[in-house]
Structure formats: structure tokens, C-alpha cells
Amino acid sequence: MSYPHPEYLISAEELAAQLDDPGLRVFDTSVLLHHSDGVYRSEPGRAHYLKEHIAGAGFINLSEDWSDTNSALSNTLPEIDALCRAIGADGIGNDNPVVLYSSSHLMWATRAWWLLRYAGHDNVRVLNGNLSAWRAAGLPTQSGEETYPATSFKAAPRPELFVSTQEVVDGMNAATCTINALPAAIYEGSGDFYYGRPGHIPGSRSLPFADLLRDEFFLPAEELQELLTAQGMLDTPRTMIYCGGGIAATLDGFACMLLGQHNVGVYDGSMSEWASDPARPLKIGTEP
């Protein structure tokens, strides 16, 4: 079988054939995560981009320009007007086709894809296989900084792509599929690392984001469908996904949309927000 929505992905070879399109916008979206003292600190991946990037690509500063830097939570959703100003400042207009990749983990490309979809952009694709696929194909890279002319982006928001804490609470007792995209040990509360308090949101199931990829490529459609179907993600009226801070969850959400499930919402605050309130319940173990 093939993905119901293959237009959300692009191969390295397909992208190489389109690089001469003056309207095309290609971006490295990388962010580096540093773990210390039980917390993650994010750093824009600009240094990696400056060292090597796909020829012609610009850089999106997700953790600063495309995030609410006044929030107590990192890499969190900004107000829609601020997001659209950032999108336009990076040279993306409503009619520009966009391709996203990362020189770090692919989840940053799906986060940028999710934000653009939320803002109302329809023609956005993720480079399947990430930068490593581009290198493996022997395609050109270069160093230094490249930018696109600033433009304006008009919002057509899709608020349903994000869910609030209250919607997650309501979903605990409703016909909603809630998915934890973190590694199994964090879901179970059995590892050394957790977000404030160990465990998972009661009623949520586990599908670690890493299980969806093989060498930075999304699993073939049939394998991916089997994984998501086993967790009830494709045949439910609404799928809600969370992780530590709303980034890895977009990888699971992107996989849902590849397979035709579009009623998907990412809990932006995720465990960083949920676990901060001791009144919100958490469950230890492998059961939802």
C-alpha cells in the first residue's frame, strides 16, 4: 500500500529536481536539546546549518522566532499573529511551496510543518530521510547563511491542530484516543528521567516517536498503519498526542495525517505543563 497522503513527504531526488523553482522555500529547522539537571535546554541549530546545509536552503529559528519566548515553557506555540510575522520574515508567503528538514532530529521538521499547517499553509512537505538522505544521494550542500526575501503571510488558522489542558482532561473520559509519544520508560515512569513527576496521563497509550522511523525515514505505509491502528489512532473520532513539550508529538501527528487521520491535535504544553500541577493525575506502569 501507499500513504493516503504522500504529498506531505518529498524524497531527496524529488527535491533536487525542484531546486531551480524560484518560488520554492527550503529550510533547515534544527534545534539541539541539551539535558542537564533533569531538564532539557534547547539551542537553535544555526551552527550546524552554517557548517552544512542543502544548497539554497534557509534556516528557521524554531525555538526563538517561531516560539513564545515569554512563556515559562520552551518551544511553545506563539500567538497566531506573531507566528505569521515570523513565517513571513523567513520568506514564506501563502503561495510558496515549502520543504522542511533538520540537521538534528526529524521531529523539528514535523514541528515546523505542524506550525505552518496550523497557520493555514497547505503546500508544505517534509524531506523523508532528513539531511542524511540528501547526503547519501550525493546531492550538493554548502556552508554559510542564505535567506529568502521577507514577505507577508496571511493567517487561516486551524486551531484544532492543538489541544488545551482542558481538552486533555475531558478526553480522559470521552471517546478520544490520547497518545504519549515519549520513550516507553518515560511513559511507564520506570526510567531515571521524567518531566517533573513520573508517569503518564491516565487513559493515554504509548507509541514512542522513534518507533515510526527507520534511519530517519518514515516506515513504509503498511508497517506504519499497523502500528497506529494497534493504538486506535486511525479509527477514532479524535486523536490527541502529547510528549514532553509538544515537539516529538508532531512526529506521531504527522504519521496520522500521512495515513489519512486529520482530526489530530497536539497538546503543546504536554508533560511539561501537565506534571507541573500536582492536582493533575499521573499513572505509573504499562497500562493506559
Image (cartoon, grey):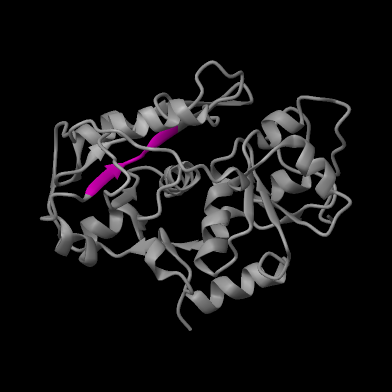
Q: Which of 146 and 4 is in front in this view?
A: 4
Who's the residue at 50% across and 31% down the image?
80
Location of residue 270 by image quarter: top right
Whether the magenta-drawn stretch holds residue 31 is answered as yes
**Residue at the far bottom in the pictured view:** 1
Q: In this view, does 164 lie above or below 5?
A: above
Whether the magenta-drawn stretch holds residue 1 is answered as no
Q: Is residue 271 above or below residue 173?
A: above
Q: Quadrant of the C terminus?
A: bottom right
Majority secondary structure of the magenta segment?
strand
Residue 93: in sight, yes or no?
Answer: yes
Q: Position of residue 9 (x, y in %)?
A: 37, 62
Location of residue 224 by image quarter: bottom right
Location of residue 6 by image quarter: bottom left
For the magenta stretch, what is the residue range? 25-32
Who's the residue at 16% across and 31% down the image?
145
Q: Nearer the viewer, residue 70 or 196?
A: 70
Q: From the viewer's perspective, is 193 left or right of 167?
A: left
Q: From the viewer's perspective, is 248 left or right of 276?
A: left
Q: Where is residue 67 in the image (x, y as percent from the top left)?
A: 48, 27
Q: Where is residue 263 in the image (x, y as percent from the top left)?
A: 63, 58
Q: From the viewer's perspective, is 229 left or right of 253?
A: right
Who's the residue at 52% across and 53% down the image?
251
Q: Nearer the viewer, residue 48 or 61?
A: 61
Q: In this view, does 41 lie above or below 172?
A: above
Residue 194: in sight, yes or no?
Answer: no
